[in-house]
């Protein structure tokens, strides 16, 4: 089937703390889809049935109308999706990567890009992902979890006995380092946990691995070249991720070949352990002694033309437009 015969709905924006990140990804995806000749419809499920008429309104700083997660059901139940052959998911974070939008689309019998309901849910639930990593012998930092009714003295005792300081405190189901804090000692734990709880009902407290920031993309059951991130802050936080010039990217990463090959194999294991498909990105910390620690799997990674997955794809000769085309074809 020719591309101009395929009707693609690009889902952008959404109702998560990563709404603006999704918009940035979707601008690049939209342009690629147009370049490829697809028949494209842009939809923001957070607006419900009341969608903007102009493309510029989707990406404007000011909201077109009131947004909510409840609008997702109205949008997908409406005639907006009539005749759609496939949905390209340009959403990030909650309600996009956690399996909820995938479930709604499946109930309507609409195909979509990337991983299915269960694998998306497994990946977004960081503790579940780590349990599965352990089961499949994928090395991951030690961790504990807590909820809003935590006892700070008991929690600090557990950290000291099971993890140690420094430690990483983060929401269990967010991305883009939203709500994340590195605690150097017990004095900052309570504030960090409360901060994470403002984004999630469950908080993950993880062993901090000193070392290098590494990521590996998977496309069509193959691991792409390993990429190293050198953030200005030492931590690849929100600012370093989304501010030009705040990070350096090296692909292939300048690490021993046997270490890179091991991380590629393990990335595939982690990807398959969660049941993921089509494409994704697996994030690591690589210790000073070249021991890799798998942090998480991103089922809907950033997809601007300068994002990490496109950089790794480019290293093997896959252009951004070709990457978008490949994702659609593999998902179909």
Image (spheres, rainbow, N blue to C red):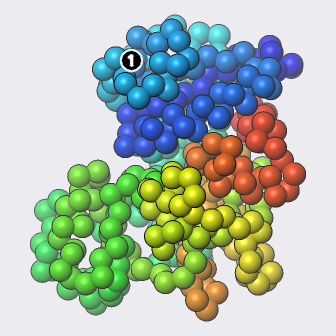
Image location (x, y in percent) of residue 147: 22, 61
> Does 167 sit left or right of 318 as displayed?
left
| Most foreground residue, 203 or 23 | 23
In front: 230, or 206?
Answer: 230
Question: Is 192 placed left or right of 80 in the picture?
Answer: left
Residue 125 in view, yes or no = no
Res 194 → quadrant: bottom left
Q: Which image quarter holds the C terminus?
A: top right
The image quarter containing residue 283 is bottom right
Residue at the disc numbered 1: 64
Q: Where, quadrant-wise, is the N terminus in this rendering?
A: top right
For residue 141, above or below residue 40 = below
**In which image quadrant can residue 85 be found?**
top right
Q: Left or right: where does residue 13 sit relative to residue 313?
A: left
- As drawn, the residue found furthest toward the front would be 245
The x, y position of residue 215, in whole percent, is 63, 65
Badge 1: residue crowd in 10 Å (few <14, some 14–19, many ≥20): some
Q: Position of residue 246 (x, y in %)?
A: 53, 61
Give the residue drawn at x 64%, y 87%. Answer: 290
Kind of element beneath mark 1: loop
Residue appearing at x 47%, y 48% in the figure = 121
Q: Is residue 230 above or below residue 218?
A: below
Picture residue at 29% right of the left edge, 52% below the top: 200
At 61% across and 21% down in the image, what residue appears? 9
């Amino acid at each position: 089937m020719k591309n101009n015969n395929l009707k693609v709905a690009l889902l952008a924006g959404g109702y998560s703390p990563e709404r603006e990140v999704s918009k940035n990804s979707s601008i690049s995806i939209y342009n690629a889809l147009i370049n490829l000749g697809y028949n494209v419809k842009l939809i923001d499920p957070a607006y419900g049935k009341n969608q903007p008429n102009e493309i510029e309104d989707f990406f404007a700083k000011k909201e077109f109308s009131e947004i909510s997660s409840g609008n997702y059901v109205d949008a997908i139940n409406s005639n907006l999706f009539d005749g759609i052959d496939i949905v390209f998911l340009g959403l990030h974070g909650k309600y996009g990567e956690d399996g909820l939008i995938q479930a709604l689309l499946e109930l309507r019998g609409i195909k979509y890009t990337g991983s299915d309901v269960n694998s998306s849910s497994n990946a977004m639930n960081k503790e579940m992902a780590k349990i599965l990593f352990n089961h499949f012998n994928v090395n991951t930092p030690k961790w504990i979890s807590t909820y809003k009714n935590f006892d700070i003295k008991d929690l600090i005792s557990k950290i000291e006995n099971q993890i140690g300081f420094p430690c990483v405190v983060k929401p269990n189901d967010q991305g883009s380092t939203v709500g994340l804090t590195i605690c150097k000692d017990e004095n900052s734990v309570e504030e960090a946990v409360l901060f994470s709880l403002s984004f999630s009902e469950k908080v993950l407290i993880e062993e901090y691995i000193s070392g290098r920031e590494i990521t590996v993309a998977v496309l069509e059951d193959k691991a792409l070249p390993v990429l190293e991130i050198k953030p200005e802050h030492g931590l690849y936080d929100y600012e370093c991720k989304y501010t030009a010039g705040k990070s350096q990217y090296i692909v292939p990463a300048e690490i021993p070949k046997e270490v890179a090959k091991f991380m590629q194999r393990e990335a595939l294991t982690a990807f398959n352990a969660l049941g993921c498909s089509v494409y994704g990105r697996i994030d690591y910390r690589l210790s000073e002694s070249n021991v890799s620690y798998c942090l998480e799997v991103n089922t809907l990674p950033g997809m601007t033309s300068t994002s990490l997955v496109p950089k790794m794809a480019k290293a093997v000769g896959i252009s951004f437009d070709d990457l978008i085309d490949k994702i659609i074809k593999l998902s179909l």
